[in-house]
Image (cartoon, grey):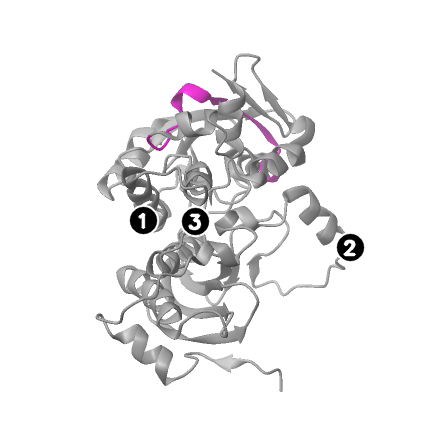
Amino acid sequence: MCGCLRYPANDKVTNAMNSPKTPVSPVHLTSFSHGGGCGCKVAPGLLSEILRGVKGWPVPKELMVGIETADDAAVYRLNDEQALIATTDFFMPIVDDPYDFGRIAATNAISDVYAMGGTPIMALALVGMPIDKLPLEVIGKILEGGESVCAAAGIPIAGGHTIDSVEPIYGLVALGLVHPGKVKTNAAARSGDVLILGKPLGVGVLSAALKKGALDTAGYAAMIASTTKLNTPGKHLAHLDAVHAMTDVTGFGLLGHLLEVCRGAKLSATLVMGKVPLLSDVERLATAGYITGASARNWMAYGDDVVLDPAITPMQRALLTDPQTSGGLLVACAPDAVDEVLAVFHADGFAAAAAIGHLASGAAQVSVGV
């Protein structure tokens, strides 16, 4: 036996999760974790080193998307009309409120299904908690937050697994469906495509400020609104032939995930910093030094593949490398489809969605101008 608990852990946790009046003890969840949200991802350079030593095995022809281009999810063709999307994501707390932590983690995990152009159908919960340190009602609120997001996505949490761990960990295995001919990978962009970003940047900066007690009520509200907003435009964009590639921006920052797009398609990218949408007040907070350690690790991993205009400030560089927990979709589409793609985003409530650059032939490199 592995000493693990099935989900849900026990009746006390279930009752705490289902009771709207359950009091939650004033526990600072972030004090239990050495890093929070997608900022605790393994740095891209180190991850490449780890995966370089993994032996490749023959894969079935039905596996449409695997690990080759570091895409958001695996895709397995079931038949001529359906392909299964499978992904998993979990992390340590980015906020102290347990209900908000559950919501953020669940939104982030489901995003990978939308990023492939799919529609989520089911989830499994992944739960690791320091059982001897966290009150059961706190754990119950984390699970309740996750369930609320799944309900908003129209899917059940059909099961899962829990362990007693040193740090709180929560996330989902998310499953979805997509037509095999509508799959949107991160590697099929074309020269001349316009780049569109669905959510503003700055979640990592806000989380750093929160952890140091420098984030006001408005800033926290903006952070929660962004990180709990499901990337539903992805399932609609799957039906547009002019959308050639799609991914979501998470722990490696905008530059890191754009580099994956460039490497997969063997193209170069140009960004215009002035067109990149930013969350309110993040420029001031970043200038004041509220930057995550993951931001610097991301920058070091990009190497010579990113070229910044000399006018780009350290604050702007920090925002481009800022790890995004539950970040926005990054879309590569034909120039004549920009208005249509933006209309899809705006119809789903993504008012900040914007065209931020373009792709061209050339070495896999990102250039950033002012």
Q: Residue 237: horizontal and vertical position, in percent?
A: 35, 44
Instruction: Report if residue 186 is visible in the image.
Output: yes
Q: Is residue 65 magenta?
A: no
Q: Residue 204: horizontal and vertical position, in percent?
A: 46, 40
Of pointers 2 and 3, the one earlier in the residue sequence: 2
Q: Residue 80: horizontal and vertical position, in percent?
A: 44, 63
Q: Which residues are magenta?
A: 263-280
Q: CA distance from mark 1 to mark 2?
A: 37 Å
Per the rendering, the mark at residue 229 is 1
Of pointers 1 and 2, the one earlier in the residue sequence: 2
Q: Amino acid at mark 3?
A: Ala
> For the point 61% across and 21% down, which residue is it?
307
Q: Give whichever of 171, 132 is nearer the camera.
A: 132
Outermost residue on the top side: it is 311
Q: Give whichever of 351, 218 is nearer the camera.
A: 218
Q: Is mark 2 in CB contact (under 8 Å) with mark 3?
A: no
User: Residue 19 appears in which quarter of the rendering?
Assistant: bottom left
Q: Which structural element holds mark 2?
A: loop
Q: Residue 123: horizontal and vertical position, in percent?
A: 41, 68
| Disc 3 target residue | 115
Q: How many marks?
A: 3
Of pointers 3 and 1, the one earlier in the residue sequence: 3
Q: Give whichever of 216, 301 is nearer the camera.
A: 216
Q: CA distance from mark 3 to mark 1?
A: 14 Å
Quadrant of the snapshot with the N terminus? bottom right
Is 58 on the left-hand or right-hand side of 183?
right
Residue count near mark 2 (Cα–Cα under 10 Å), binned few <14, some 14–19, many ≥20? few
Q: Is residue 268 magenta?
A: yes
Is 324 on the left-hand or right-hand side of 343?
right
> For the point 29% across and 43% down, which residue is it?
221
> For the point 59% across and 83% down, which residue is it?
3
| Disc 2 target residue | 53
